[in-house]
Image (cartoon, coloured by chain):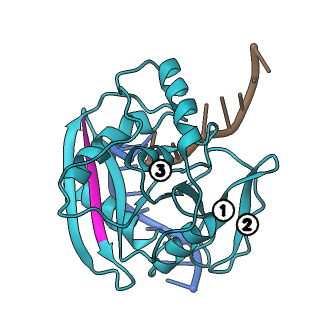
Chain colours: A cyan, B brown, C blue
Amino acid sequence: MELTLHHAHAWDLTPQQAIQVQRELAGFVRVEPLARPPQTIAGLDMSVRAEAVQAAIVVLALPSLVVIDQAIWRGPVTWPYIPGLLSFREAPAVLHALKQLHAMPDVLMADAQGVAHPRRMGLAAHIGVLLDMPVLGVAKSRLTGVYVEPDDVAGAQSPLQDGDETIGAVLRTRVGVKPLFVSVGNRMTLAEAVALVFATRTRYRMPEPTRLAHHLSRDQS
DNA sequence: GCGACAG
DNA sequence: ATCTTGTCGC
């Protein structure tokens, strides 16, 4: 499948250049309601083993959560992990894997931050701007922002803030588990992002899209 | 200079 | 993320 990239840029950059690219791309994030209820959602995840990276994508139908497509792409590691610059290590692999899908999902769910990032350009936002489509981020831990621990009740949430700005939501998906950090990647609202995470949750802490993608990337590595 | 720090 | 066995708890 062909991918149309918006605001494309080079990936072989120095950390300083990458930071500049993030500052430029941040201005293109659009927080707006979804045009229509999504019928498909894809979970994105990546694993690294030795010198190879595996990007995995699992597409599920909504609201059934039936798996309808999946893809894996393996390639060389080109960047180290640097907090704040994760997308320069993982995004290229994710884009390659997306090309292997039979059809573009309505929404993408990445295991990373969206705008809950120092420069509002986490992996989910980066992918979202390049593809100009709805993307949300679901991270297992905090990168930036302050919050109060949500109650230990499924569905409890509290805002993730950076000063006066709300950059995401801290959501408890199950009782007795650590909360997840949900944020908008592009073209959707925070409320919609939180609703999608909760709607795709089963009996685990992680929502099905990213949980399944995580297993796929690891089983293939 | 000292901590914090997605995966 | 990854390296790794058993083990505490519901």
Rendered-image quadrant of the N terminus of chain A: bottom left
Tag 1 secondary structure: strand
Q: CA distance from mark 2 to mark 1?
A: 6 Å
How crowded pointer 2 is (Cα within 10 Å; few <14, some 14-19, many 20+) is rated as some
Q: Amino acid at mark 3?
A: Ala
**Are discs 3 and 1 less than 8 Å apart at CB?**
no
Q: CA distance from mark 3 to mark 1?
A: 15 Å
Q: Amino acid at mark 2?
A: Ser
Q: Amino acid at mark 1?
A: Ala
Tag 3 secondary structure: helix
Residue A124, numbered label: 3
> Is residue A61 on the magenta stretch?
no
How crowded pointer 1 is (Cα within 10 Å; few <14, some 14-19, many 20+) is rated as many
**Are discs 2 and 1 less than 8 Å apart at CB?**
yes
Residue under label 2? A158
Q: Position of residue A65 (x, y in %)?
A: 34, 80
Q: Chain of mark 3?
A: A
Q: Identify whether C1 is placed above or below A75.
A: below
Tell me where the magenta segment starts and ends, as one range.
A52-59
Residue under label 1? A169
Prevailing secondary structure of the magenta residues: strand
Q: Position of residue A150 (x, y in %)?
A: 73, 69
Q: Is residue A127 left or right of residue A194?
A: left
